Image (spheres, rainbow, N blue to C red):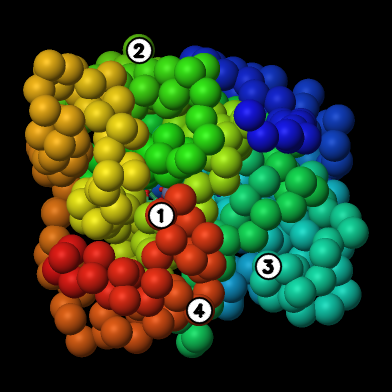
Amino acid sequence: MQNFDYQTPTRLIFGKGVIEKLPGVMASVGRKVLLTYGGGSIKKIGLYQKVLELLKGFEIVELSGIQPNPKYDPSVLEGVRLCKAHGIEVILSVGGGSVLDCSKAIAAGACYEGDPWDLITRKVRAKAALPIVDILTLAATGSEYDQYGVISRTETNDKVSYGDPLVYPHTSFLDPTYTFSVSKKQTAAGIADAMNHTIEQYFTEDTTLLNDGFCESMLRSLMVNGRKCLDHPEDYTARAEMMLACTYGCNGILALGNTYSGWPCHGIEHALSAYYDITHGEGLAIITPRWMNHILSERTLDRFVKYGINVFGIDASLDKWEIARKAIDATYGFFESIGIPMHLREVGIDESRIGEMAHHIAVNEGLENAYVPLSEKDIHEILTASL
Ligand code: NZQ
Ligand code: ZN
């Protein structure tokens, strides 16, 4: 087992109606609030109105229109400008992972005199950040319980994942009822995202019985409850378990003591989203089984066998290679069965920029250090197989 140094400072407040605690939590961090949100879903579900009602007496400045795959320009830059102009003390993010990731970049940028891109690209280490409180409305990324944010810069086709303990949310409000209105497309993408977060941590060299069991349970739970959420969007129990599983996805708890895997599917997907602005979870679902096929070898065989038996219940008495291939087919089959388009062409990506993207990924994502090292040629082959 590898050494580690681990701390998650975020307070999670989970369940139906927990938003009533919002004024108390906010008052403990500040009264001048930057309220961040996306394209309007929070107004449709009445959450925006509820937040304003609860925060009467607070000074609120708004930043709306934060898009999926949140953009550096205008959203991060505008948020930083508003924080500085109004002396903002706390950011309240209401929405999905994109709103929260953007809020994290704003929180650090607001306490920095230079170009916030320096912080996102880790050219400069942030010395401080504003506190962030969030009300999550979409279960997927785990941003509510982690120190990461992913920001896109359209003009350079960059989608950069940055991390800093300073941007862990102070408090995350997780009320599963706010996810009832999430569309089938976004629910399925959320299931795929959280499953891939788990897979990225499961497929690595040095693992433990403890972590393997945690990951296998995550995957089974996400498949069972995810399907229930799609069939019955207002099934509270299913939405609640899915929300909690997603929350565990990215803060490292699933892989404490494991070797770092390099998160290869994320490295590849971030380029797809950067070049084509596709939905993150859909890109991951398309890449994952192709990446699995690519890395299946004598060396990785036993991992696939364990995955196949414990996650999909494949007959353990079969030949190992047959179990592994069945496991990859089952992964593909599950994503397809929840309505995800399983070819890049179906999400608007053809072969024209595959070479350019493979090069961009090879240069920027460090996948030569992944569990199974990936060269530019490997990445090109995985992308081509995904078409
Ligand atoms: O903009 P609004 O109107 O709010 O609509 C959003 C958006 O169109 C909608 N939505 C959110 N909550 C809703 C709702 N619609 C109806 N009812 C609700 N309750 O859903 C759409 C997608 O929202 P978005 O926030 O983009 O989705 P998600 O939470 O999946 O976030 C995706 C982003 O997170 C990044 C991804 O790369 C992508 O940019 N990631 C962040 C990570 C992290 N911070 O740790 C890790 C992940 O691997 C991922 O990379
Ligand atoms: Zn992800």
Please report whichever mark, 4 or 3, sits nearer to the chain's N-terminal start.
3
Quadrant the N terminus occupies:
top right
The answer to whether residue 145 is left or right of residue 96 is right
Amino acid at circle 2: Thr
SS at mark 3 in the image: helix
Q: How many marks?
A: 4
- Of marks 2 and 3, which one's residue comes earlier in the chain? 3
Q: Residues within 10 Å of mark 1 (few under 14, many from 20)?
A: many
Dot 2 crowding, Cα within 10 Å, few <14, some 14–19, many 20+: some
Residue that badge 3 annotates: 120
Q: Which residue is label 1 attached to? A: 372
Q: Amino acid at mark 1?
A: Val
Residue under label 2, please give it: 237
Mark nearer the viewer, 4 or 1: 1
Q: Which residue is mark 4?
A: 363
Asked whether residue 197 is in view, the answer is no
* Quadrant in which the C terminus appears: bottom left
Q: In the rendered image, is residue 174 in sight?
A: yes
Gap in angstroms between the C-alphas marked 2 and 3: 37 Å
Q: State yes or no: Cβ of the residue under disc 2 lies below 8 Å from any atom of ligand 1.
A: no
Residue occupying the point 78% across, 24% down: 24
Cα separation, mark 4 vs mark 2, equals 43 Å
Q: Nearer the viewer, residue 317 or 283?
A: 317
Vertical arrangement, residue 383 with respect to residue 108, above or below? below
